[in-house]
Amino acid sequence: MTAVDDARALLARPAVGVWSAPGRANLIGEHTDYNEGFVLPFAIAQRTVAAVALRDDDVIRVRSTFAPGSVEVSLAELDARIAAGGLDWAGYPLGVAWALRTAAPDAAPRGVDIALASEVPVGAGLSSSAAIEGAVASALNDVWNAGLDKIALARVGRTAENDAVGAPTGIMDQMASMLGEADAATFLDCRTLETRPVALGFDEAGLAILVVDTLVEHAHSSGGYRERRASCEQGAAAFGVPALRDLTVDDLPRAAEILDDVTFRRVRHIVTENQRVLDTVAALDADGPTAIGDLLTASHASMRDDFEISVPELDLAVETALSAGALGARMTGGGFGGAAIALIPTELVPAATEAVHAAFAASGFRAPNVFTVTPSEGARRDA
Ligand code: GLA
């Protein structure tokens, strides 16, 4: 059974259409999005599918393969239910419906049944939430005749995440999920939302991206993510600039003088990470994927030492992958758990997988999920 079949089966009525959107892995550019900087994520092949049927009333009913039962909210009550919160996973699809209604005042909202089936691992740092948002936003955009383009739908997903679910994230994940292309990463300027696909050429170079999902759970609506964001805002305020995007490596000596040590290191991560994204794009364009390994590994060191968002499991995954022959490796996503990625010759994938399992066992860590991901197409209508 495919996820499309699963979603149709769960809907238990004939669908008027089926839409899907993928998770993403971020190749490089971490925590730079909400600093109006640069990111280079790619959509992965694992997708979340939304099958939709029309209703005669004004109720939105959502079901999913990842939680039992269904949640029903009428369009008349939607604002109040979103404001009240506590919707759990249903906050993502219902938050999208709520945000879409505001973003597209000319749309024609109506009652729908939505059934969701997902192949994207939850909590792995691969944006299972952006995949739900992208699938539902694409579906309701068509069914409600909202007429929004992909960037506007990415914004709708982000609004759902920030204001309905309450996670203070940037827009990288939604943009990657909406705009992904096969064999390419999405280079995104998070200030202007200008994007460009950057060819990756992993296959041709005999390379693969290995994911090590540590199964250490993270939640961006709480704790560390919010704190890092606050430190970045403090750093930008100290320089009197709207966002850390406006600083370059030449500003770092001054940053060291005027900021406390912790804020300085947070700022240094963002400023150097923005530069690493630009360098990675230039290296891919000029020399292809074999040229980017050191940039990926430098990004991990910066997150581990300056931004302090890694965990021992992620560090071990990175070190083990490098020892097993990866050209570069880094944690991906928000941090505090989730997954690491390694750029590795395809023929070394089985041995590296074994090495990671052995290293985790030797350290007494929970056995991770280790698998490869393929740069793939973004959100689409499937049927
Ligand atoms: C999470 C957020 C993104 C981004 C990353 C860190 O995935 O959803 O907006 O901030 O963390 O790069």
Image (cartoon, rainbow, N blue to C red):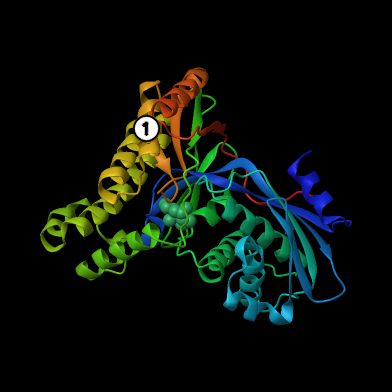
Q: Quadrant of ligand 1?
A: bottom left
Which quadrant of the structure image shows residue 284? top left
Which quadrant of the structure image shows residue 112? bottom right
Which of these two is toward me, 217 or 74?
A: 217
The N terminus: image quadrant: top right
Q: Is mark 1 within 8 Å of ligand 1?
A: no
Q: Residue at x 49, y 49 (%)?
A: 196
Left or right of 147? Residue 248 is left
Which of these two is toward me, 298 or 291?
A: 298
Residue flagged by tag 1: what amino acid is it? Answer: Leu
- Please tell me how many numbered marks the rendered image carries: 1
Q: Which residue is mark 1?
A: 316
Extreme left residue here?
Answer: 257
Q: Where does the image place residue 95, in percent across and percent down from the top left?
A: 62, 68
Residue 324 against residue 299 in the figure, above or below? above
Q: Secondary structure at mark 1?
A: helix
Q: Where does the image place residue 69, in percent across and percent down from the top left?
A: 75, 59
Classed neighbour count for the residue bearing mark 1: other residues with Cα under 10 Å, few (<14), some (14–19), many (≥20): some
Which of these two is toward me, 238 or 5?
A: 5
Left or right of 368? Residue 252 is left
Residue 155 visible? The answer is yes
Q: Where does the image place residue 138, in percent across and percent down from the top left?
A: 68, 59
Residue 258 against residue 330 in the figure, above or below? below
